[in-house]
Amino acid sequence: MVAKSNPATRHIVSINDLSDDEIETVFETAQGYLDLLPDKTFPYRIGRSTDVASPFILATLFYEPSTRTRLSFESAMLRLGGDVITSADPATSSAAKGESLADSVRVVANYADVLVIRHPRDGAAKLAAEYSPIPVINGGDGAHEHPTQTLCDIFTLRTKNKSLKGRNIAISGDLRGSRTIHSFVYALARFGANIMLMPAAGMGLPAHVDHRLREEFGCRTVSRDSYQRENAAVDALYVTPEEPHQLSLMSDIDADVSVKIRNKIDAVYVTRFQKERWAEKDQAYPTIDAKFLKEAKYSDASVMHPLPRVGELDISLDTDDRAVYFQQAAYGVPIRMALISLLLGLHKEKSFTTFDGGFPAPKTTIYQQPMGTGIHCANPNCIVQEPMEAQYAKNKFYAIGLDDPARSKLRCAYCESDIEHFVTANRKTKTYFSDTDHLRAAIASRALDDIILFANAAEAERAGFHAKRDATARRTGSGAPSTD
Ligand code: NCD
């Protein structure tokens, strides 16, 4: 018998698996470790160890290169007095023999108490979590998310007395392929920051991240022109939250400061070209250097980078007071000490052993159908596209925004990318419909087993379904799939 995943086990796959209060708790706890175990010379460095986690083992299961994430997780566990086991090179693990992620996770879960996973496929952390009886922390899954990097990033801004509410955060580079950016923008929106997108050509945010920012995180897009009219010095696309979900991350700064000087940039976050995620390896890419940052609007901007940098952030900035990227990396230890210890329930007053719902997601229904039939995730890098892994994944989607035809879509439960066009077929009547009323009605009447979704009419027809005029359902008043 294999160890079974327990639905109550807490996992951190996305930054949105943590509520705003929990993010605050991570920061308080990390600061507590910095105060308790200081290094006299470097205030951002943990200088000593404790033994609170001595009975516990952390496993790192890394299928992609890493320096900071793996070593800072391991350092964090060792600083807590726990032990570490690691599989850092897929070439020397059973992955090289073709073992699936689901099997590896179920095996390693017997050897450790908490598991950190990094994988080149989007959605791999979610799949791992589905099979793991111990907490899984996402250390980066493809181009999807990297939640613990975001915790380091926001904590760094916080130590610079920069609460996020009303701050102007510019983000430069590969916004499509950088998982750090995807977790980061969700957090920025949640805490009320303004996000300025400065993508390299053709490397803007993925459509599903953009949808979520506008439809779930209360952001509104402001055109370059209208923004420039109000703020002559700013020249990038601007997105600003309408309803920040928390007024401010910090209470001890003047949160109005950025409102007064709207054209000031508070941070510039730079990322490298994620060439491992692009077919075309040779693309034009912006460089951030002292000349770029000379403009007055950047005079107080923290210069951030998750690292590694490979030329897009000039090394002459290392001695610039605005540079905080090595601090972001250093904070990986206290932040990850905090997260591990909270997940293991090592603190009396606070614990992440149960899930408090994270960021309140919109109400969605999971639609699931057998693999090998009907619609599939369209993201070629999704974990479900790997035939070995797909055997263990479920073919499931969140049905989003069905009340509004302009917004209705399916969202892959693993990589969270969206499918905007699909047709709904009824197994009983052998008919298919191209509007979303029928899926909505099937959800309402709990008749999802009668439904099969296809990417388009041609696929539905190939599978033996025939078109039903959408007006039929409307005439019946219910919108339910016809059963005649
Ligand atoms: C990032 C990653 O792996 O996504 N690195 C990190 O964890 N600090 C950024 C990158 O590789 O560009």
Image (tube, rainbow, N blue to C red):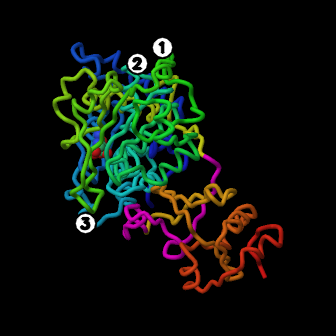
Q: Position of residue 310 (x, y in %)?
A: 19, 43
- The residue that mark 3 highlights is 97
| Residue 171 falls in image quadrant | top left
Q: Residues within 10 Å of mark 2 (few under 14, many from 20)?
A: some
Q: Is residue 242 above or below residue 135?
A: above
Q: What amino acid is found at the position of numbered circle 3 in the picture?
A: Lys
Amino acid type, mark 1? Asp
Above or below residue 192? Residue 415 is below
Q: Which stretch did the figure color magenta?
A: 362-390
Tell me whether circle 2 and circle 3 mark residues in contact (CB < 8 Å).
Answer: no
Locate residue 58, reporting x and y percent: 33, 40
Residue positioned 43% across, 69% down in the render:
391
Give yes or no for residue 408 being in the magenta stretch. no
Q: Quadrant of the N terminus?
A: bottom left
Q: Position of residue 5 (x, y in %)?
A: 48, 53
In this rendering, does residue 255 appear at all?
yes
- Alpha carbons under labels 2 and 3: distance apart: 49 Å
**Residue 317 figure quarter:** top left
Residue 340 visible in the picture: no
**Residue farthest left in this picture:** 316
Front position in the image: 301 or 101: 301
Q: Residue shown at 52%/43% (left/top)?
A: 221
Residue 250 on image: x %, y %: 48, 20
* Amino acid type shown at disc 2: Asn
Identify the residue under disc 2. 161
Task: In the rendered structure, find residue 252 and report the number of the disc placed on it.
Answer: 1
Q: Which secondary structure, mark 2?
A: loop
Q: Are marks 2 and 1 in contact (CB under 8 Å)?
A: yes
Is tag 2's residue or tag 1's residue first in the polypeptide sequence? 2
